[in-house]
Amino acid sequence: MSNLLELAQRCETDMSSPYGLSSEIGEALNDHAAQRYEHPGSQSESWPNYVYSVDAAMALVHRKLCPGILDMTVTWDTEQPPAEPAASIRWYPDGKCGKHWHAQTSGAPTAARAICSVLLKALHARDLQKAAAKAKSRNAQRAKSNYKSDTIEKPDERRVKILVSDF
């Protein structure tokens, strides 16, 4: 999933062809719900121009991060001149609510690029959280099964020695 971070970085810095970057984002996110556009005189279709259109970028956020999105803000990053658009997203991980929200922020030369960048970072962070939760669950199951086998099949030698010495 580091591809998502690479694409987010490109949204923030790479001002070359927006169409190539938009199609890479659509493919990376497997966005089959998006309305593809046919080019006149050609049989090829293209992805919506996520990094050029705020509407397309916001629709992508809705498709990929809902439910669970708490809020999204698009503002100006005035920390470093020149001021650039910045975006932030707060969302709940699966099965969480209340104070358990997570956030990502990003700045880019255009608002659409900032939205795409922050979405890609949020999706990457969410994927890492899901992987960590799976690993934690697997480790807990493994520890539980090891605990049972150690206590039932193999008595603790130190405990046996202590019991013997107490007699």
Image: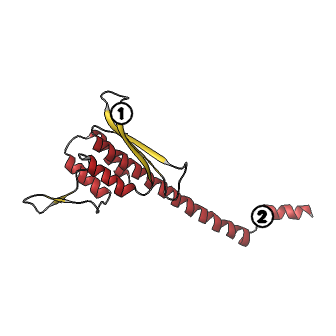
Residue 106 - label? none
Q: Position of residue 68 (x, y in %)?
A: 45, 55
Instruction: Tell me the distance, in whole angstroms, between the alpha carbons under discs 1 and 2.
Output: 63 Å
Of 138 and 151, the residue lying toward us? 138
- State the residue at coordinates (77%, 64%): 157
Of 4 and 87, the residue lying toward us? 87
Q: Position of residue 6 (x, y in %)?
A: 33, 47
As helix, strand or loop, the secondary structure at mark 2 comes to helix
Label 1 CA crowd tier, 10 Å (few <14, some 14–19, many 20+): some
Q: Quadrant of residue 10?
A: top left
Label 2 CA crowd tier, 10 Å (few <14, some 14–19, many 20+): few
**What residue does disc 2 label?**
157
State which mark lies toward you, 1 or 2: 1
The residue positioned farthest toward the top in the image shown? 81
Amino acid beneath label 1: Asp
Residue 77 - label? 1
Q: What is the quadrant of the N terminus in the image?
A: bottom left
141 left or right of 74 in image:
right
Q: What is the quadrant of the C terminus in the image?
A: bottom right
- State the residue at coordinates (54%, 50%): 100
Q: Position of residue 32 (x, y in %)?
A: 28, 63
Q: Earlier in the sequence, mark 1 or mark 2?
A: 1
As helix, strand or loop, the secondary structure at mark 1 comes to strand
Asked if the residues shown at circle 1 and circle 2 are in contact, with their CB atoms under 8 angstroms apart, the answer is: no
Amino acid beneath label 2: Glu
Q: How many marks?
A: 2
Q: Position of residue 109 (x, y in %)?
A: 28, 37
Of 157 and 153, the residue lying toward us? 153
- State the residue at coordinates (34%, 34%): 76
The residue positioned farthest toward the left in the image shown? 41
- State the residue at coordinates (32%, 27%): 81
